[in-house]
Image (cartoon, rainbow, N blue to C red):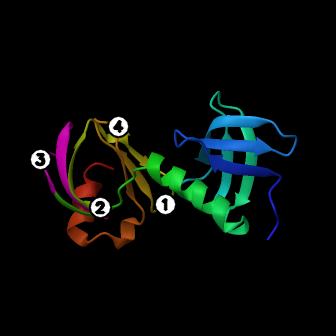
Amino acid sequence: MPTPDFRLSRNAFGSLVLTAADGSVHEGVVPVRSFPMAAPREGISLVSADGHELAWIDRLDTVPEALRALVEEELASREFVPEIRRIRHVSSFATPSTWEVETDRGDASLVLKGEEDIRRLSADTLLVADTHGIHFLIRDLRALDKASRKLLDRFL
């Protein structure tokens, strides 16, 4: 396992601190996934508080466990994308409409402003944004039950 040319730790306030090979210290570092849906464990940039890339991780599974744990903890605290498993009910086929869905994090209700809030990420993957800015993922359209697909088709 290759050793990265930087160190990552947490300060007293819980923020990530990156110490570069040249000894420079950067506080408030944020990990950002390049391909969060398609390749969540690949292509992770460690970005400074002012948005400049400080380090790059090709693959999370190739870095030491302690570094990987820090990056995964930070990503988990920043990312909240429930995965829709089933669409139980929609209030209307005109927008805005309220959807009652079952997700991997429990039941939820979301309000869809318009059809443009459903974004296709790939042939079988969709990202649905609700009026509160929460994104819901439909990872595989084919995995949805027939009733859910039928409801969803009215909006696509």
What residue is pinned by disc 2? 105
Secondary structure found at label 3: loop
Q: Residues within 10 Å of mark 4 (few under 14, many from 20)?
A: few
Closer to the eye: label 1 or 3: 3
Label 2 or label 3, whichever comes before in sequence order: 3
| Residue 2 among those drawn in magenta | no
Q: From what the image shows, is residue 142 above or below residue 100? A: below
Measured in 3D between alpha carbons, the distance from the residue under mark 1 to the one under mark 2, in whole angstroms, is: 24 Å
Quarter holding residue 17: top right
User: What's drawn in magenta, residue-wise?
Assistant: 89-105
The amino acid at mark 2 is: Arg
Give the camera-side residue of 112 and 58. 58
N-term mark: 1 or 2: 2
Residue type at the position of mark 3: Ser
What SS does tag 2 mark? Answer: loop
Earlier along the polypeptide chain: callout 4 or callout 3? 3
* Residue found farthest to the top: 50
Query: Whole-Å distance between the Cαs marked 4 and 3?
Result: 19 Å
Q: Which residue is mark 4?
A: 133
- Quadrant location of residue 132? top left
N-term-proximal mark, 1 vs 3: 3
Residue 102 belongs to magenta span = yes
Q: Secondary structure at mark 4?
A: loop
Q: CA distance from mark 1 to mark 4?
A: 23 Å
Q: Which mark is residue 91?
A: 3
Q: Crowding near pointer 3: few (<14 within 10 Å), some, many (20+)? A: few
Instruction: Please state which amino acid type lies under the numbered disc 1.
Output: Ala
Q: Residue 83 at x, y = what percent?
A: 36, 60
Say which residue label 1 marks.
Answer: 123
